[in-house]
Image (tube, rainbow, N blue to C red):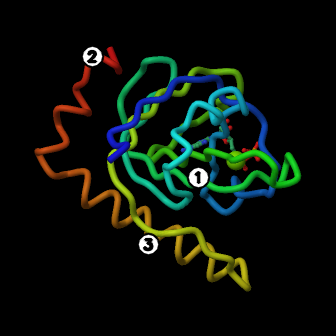
């Protein structure tokens, strides 16, 4: 009922949990952007579209949860863009349009389980976002 949800903000340093090495880098928003989220938007994993510095629009998956960087007192929005950027994106402008909910957040016992879950989220989002019903968001003036 809160979706689609649009957000704009700078990409900042996250907790540095080394997700980049695992091929699942997540671009983090600062608290000022996260605080604008509707309070009744559930934590969990979402899919949608994203752009960096108003360049091409790509598919994305986003995890909304509690941010260990702020002792779990602030929420976090972490976006993995389904595109192979050949550079770091810190300081650049991230635009996202959140379109759908995939699953609640879970605790994983092993990193392998976590990676498996994220990869299946990515696969799900990749298929789902091919639906021509979503073209209107991919081509939205928000991204122009
Ligand atoms: P951090 O803890 O600082 O967020 P990560 O390991 O999660 O570190 O890596 C995130 C950084 O990787 C992003 O801020 C961005 O600069 C870069 N990056 C490169 N490719 C991507 C991508 N496809 N999606 C998201 N971030 C990416
Ligand atoms: Mg990150």
**Residue in view at x 53 percent, y 68 percent:** 118
Residue 32 appears left or right of 46: right
Label number found at residue 120: 3
Task: Please provide percent x and percent y for residue 120.
Answer: 43, 72
In the structure shown, which secondary structural element does the residue marked by tag 1 occupy?
Answer: strand
In the structure shown, which secondary structural element does the residue marked by tag 3 occupy?
Answer: helix
Q: Residues within 10 Å of mark 3 (few under 14, many from 20)?
A: few
Determine the quadrant in which ligand 1 lies: top right
Find the distance from the CA under tag 2 to the CA under tag 3.
30 Å
Task: Please provide percent x and percent y for residue 48.
Answer: 37, 45
Find the distance from the CA under tag 1 to the CA under tag 2.
25 Å
Give the residue pinned by disc 2.
141
Q: Is 127 above or below relative to 112?
A: above
Label number found at residue 64: 1
Quadrant where the C terminus is found in the figure: top left
The one nearer the camera, 86 or 18, is: 18
- Verify CB contact (< 8 Å) between mark 1 and mark 2: no
Q: Residues within 10 Å of mark 1 (few under 14, many from 20)?
A: many
Task: Please provide percent x and percent y for residue 68.
Answer: 82, 55
């Amino acid at each position: 009922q809160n979706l689609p949800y649009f957000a704009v903000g700078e990409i900042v340093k996250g907790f540095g949990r080394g997700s980049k090495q695992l091929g699942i880098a997540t671009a983090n928003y600062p608290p000022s952007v996260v605080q604008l989220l509707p309070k009744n938007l559930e934590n969990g994993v979402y899919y949608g579209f994203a752009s960096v510095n108003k360049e091409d629009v790509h598919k994305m998956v986003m995890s909304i949860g509690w941010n260990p960087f702020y002792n779990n007192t602030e929420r976090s929005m972490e976006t993995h863009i389904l595109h192979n950027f050949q550079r770091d994106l810190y300081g650049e402008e991230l635009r996202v349009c959140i379109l759908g909910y995939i699953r609640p957040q879970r605790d994983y016992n092993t990193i392998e389980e976590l990676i498996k879950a994220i990869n299946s989220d990515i696969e799900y989002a990749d298929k789902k976002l091919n639906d021509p019903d979503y073209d209107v968001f991919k081509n939205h003036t928000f991204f122009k």
